[in-house]
């Protein structure tokens, strides 16, 4: 019984030991990115935490545990009753939030000697915490980053592309910047991590590339956006007019168009090298024989028609002028009739060939090249302005008397260049007809947008012999 009482006494004495009371420590931890250092002479942070400051990595996100150590210890450090000052410094891009109790062991610090003084263990009042060591203590400082990053630049394809599009971008300099997220609404809807130089390959259409910057604490910038167009479709080339299939002309004009407004053409005459060209394209100095012109349209982003439009024709040798008839050979000198032959009697020997027949009239000449080609003689154009009626332009055409004619009338805007419509006709000699040239939907939209258009009206006419003539007028077309 006495032994038990003695043990109990010893235990009570140990708990009250002055040595334990004079050797206290502070368990210190950091959430977010920053440092804590001590300004008091004990400087147990420098002595115990491996460095002059306790530091969390500069990338530690808001509210994430970054560093911890115990300043002081049970065997030495802070004397009970001493005054200690800790100073919290945020990492770049972060700010001091508060001192607060941590989950660790010990009594939570109250920064009661700070200015203003803390009244609670959670203290947002100052980044400097001054307090009296009275026990084994614990405290934690919280740094936060609540500043969104900001996008600085974004660039992508100017206009359109016919394949993948690359995008480069950057954010305003920011030590908390972690990464970027990109998306293409309607194609790749979800935001996904990406880096400058990323390529996107959506199908044909108009798209918006969006990018935003993200920091270590998952703050996000407003998105930046870049609109571009993808066009992988090659245009279709159409020959509008060309020479007749057989002609004596050694030059030819070929008109053509593309199914797409912007872009260009390449032309190849016979086995020559394809070269850039525009409509109408003229070929001159053509040799007698067969000729072919191939035309490839290309669009604004470089897609070229894989199947060129082609027109073929033959240049015939010009009709030779009829040679003058050879001079009449002198009739062979008649031998003097031998005496004794009665006048009128047939001479002996083979009968003389009859004299060459004198042509009664020159043989019909083959129709050679002539400059007087058939032509749509009159196009009624009104007083300088054409009006659109029911989506079409009405033009009066007539054929000269004495020649039937056929051909086409093409109407095209001159600025921007756009084929608007075309109509064919066939007229008997001396006849007149009203031709309606219906505008294409694209042409109609253009006219509706601009209110009026400068148009070129081109007629291509062939006469019965296949000879071709062209004429052009320029007028203003109004709605
Ligand atoms: Ca930030
Ligand atoms: Ca295209």
Image: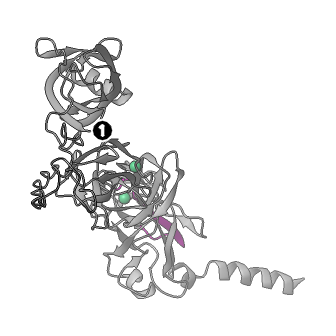
What residue would you read off at disc 1? 466
Quarter the C terminus occupies: top left
Residue 156, by quadrant, is: bottom left
Residue 448 in percent (x, y) is at 28, 21
Q: Is mark 1 within 8 Å of ligand 2?
A: no
Question: Residue 251 at x, y = what percent?
Answer: 19, 51
On screen, residue 356 above or below 88: above
- Using residue 165 as the reference point, say whether residue 360 is left or right of it: left
228 in the magenta segment: no
| Crowding near the residue tagged with mark 1, few <14, some 14–19, many ≥20 C-alpha atoms within 10 Å | some
Horizontal side of residue 373 vs 292, given as left or right: left
Q: Residue at x 27, y 60 (%)?
A: 172
Q: Position of residue 339 (x, y in %)?
A: 11, 59
**Left or right: where 272 falls relative to 132:** left
Q: Quadrant of the N terminus?
A: bottom right
Q: Quadrant of residue 371?
A: top left
Work out which residue is located at the far front of the displayed protein and give it. 340
Residue range of the region highlighted in magenta in the rendering: 132-149
Q: Quadrant of ligand 1?
A: bottom left
Residue pictured at 35% horizontal, 24% vertical: 426
Q: Secondary structure at mark 1?
A: loop
User: Is 435 placed above or below 21 here?
Assistant: above
């Amino acid at each position: 019984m006495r032994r038990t009482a003695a043990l109990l006494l010893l235990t009570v004495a140990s708990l009250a030991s002055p040595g334990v009371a004079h050797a206290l420590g502070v368990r210190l931890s950091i959430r977010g990115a920053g440092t804590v250092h001590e300004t008091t002479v004990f400087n147990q942070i420098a002595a115990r935490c491996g460095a002059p400051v306790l530091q969390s990595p500069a990338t530690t996100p808001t509210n994430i545990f970054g560093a911890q150590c115990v300043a002081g210890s049970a065997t030495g450090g802070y004397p009970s009753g001493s005054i200690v000052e800790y100073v919290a410094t945020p990492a770049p891009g972060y700010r001091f939030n508060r001192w607060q109790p941590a989950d660790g062991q010990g009594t939570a610090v109250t920064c009661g000697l700070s200015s203003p003084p803390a009244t609670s263990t959670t203290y947002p009042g100052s980044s400097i915490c001054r307090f009296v060591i009275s026990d084994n203590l614990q405290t934690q400082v919280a740094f936060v980053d609540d500043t969104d990053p900001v996008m600085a630049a974004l660039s992508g394809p100017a206009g359109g592309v016919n394949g993948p599009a690359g995008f480069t971008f950057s954010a305003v300099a920011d030590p908390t910047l972690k990464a970027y997220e990109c998306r293409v609404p309607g194609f790749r809807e979800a935001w996904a991590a990406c880096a400058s130089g990323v390529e996107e390959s959506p199908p044909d259409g108009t798209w918006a590339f969006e990018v935003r910057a993200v920091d270590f604490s998952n703050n996000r910038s407003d998105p930046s956006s870049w609109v571009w167009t993808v066009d992988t479709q090659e245009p279709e080339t159409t020959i509008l007019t060309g020479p007749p299939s057989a002609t004596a002309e050694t030059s030819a004009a070929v008109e053509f168009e593309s199914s797409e407004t912007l872009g260009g053409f390449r032309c190849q005459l016979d086995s020559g090298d394809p070269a850039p060209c525009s409509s109408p394209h003229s070929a001159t100095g053509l040799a007698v024989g067969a000729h072919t012109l191939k035309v490839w349209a290309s669009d604004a982003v470089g897609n070229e028609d894989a199947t060129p439009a082609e027109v073929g024709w033959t240049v015939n040798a010009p009709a030779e002028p009829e040679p003058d008839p050879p001079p009449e050979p002198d009739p062979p000198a008649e031998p003097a009739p031998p005496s004794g032959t009665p006048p009128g009697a047939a001479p002996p020997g083979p009968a003389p060939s009859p004299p060459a027949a004198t042509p009664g009239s020159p043989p019909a000449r083959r129709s050679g090249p002539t400059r007087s080609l058939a032509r749509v003689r009159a196009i009624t154009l009104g007083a300088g302005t054409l009006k659109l009626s029911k989506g079409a332009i009405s033009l009066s055409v007539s054929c000269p008397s004495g020649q039937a004619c056929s051909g086409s009338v093409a109407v095209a805007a001159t600025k921007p260049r756009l084929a608007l419509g075309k109509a064919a006709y066939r007229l008997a000699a001396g006849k007149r007809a009203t031709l309606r040239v219906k505008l294409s939907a694209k042409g109609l939209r253009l006219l509706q947008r601009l209110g009026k258009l400068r148009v070129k009206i081109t007629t291509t006419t062939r006469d019965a012999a296949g000879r071709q003539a062209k004429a052009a007028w320029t007028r203003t077309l109004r709605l």
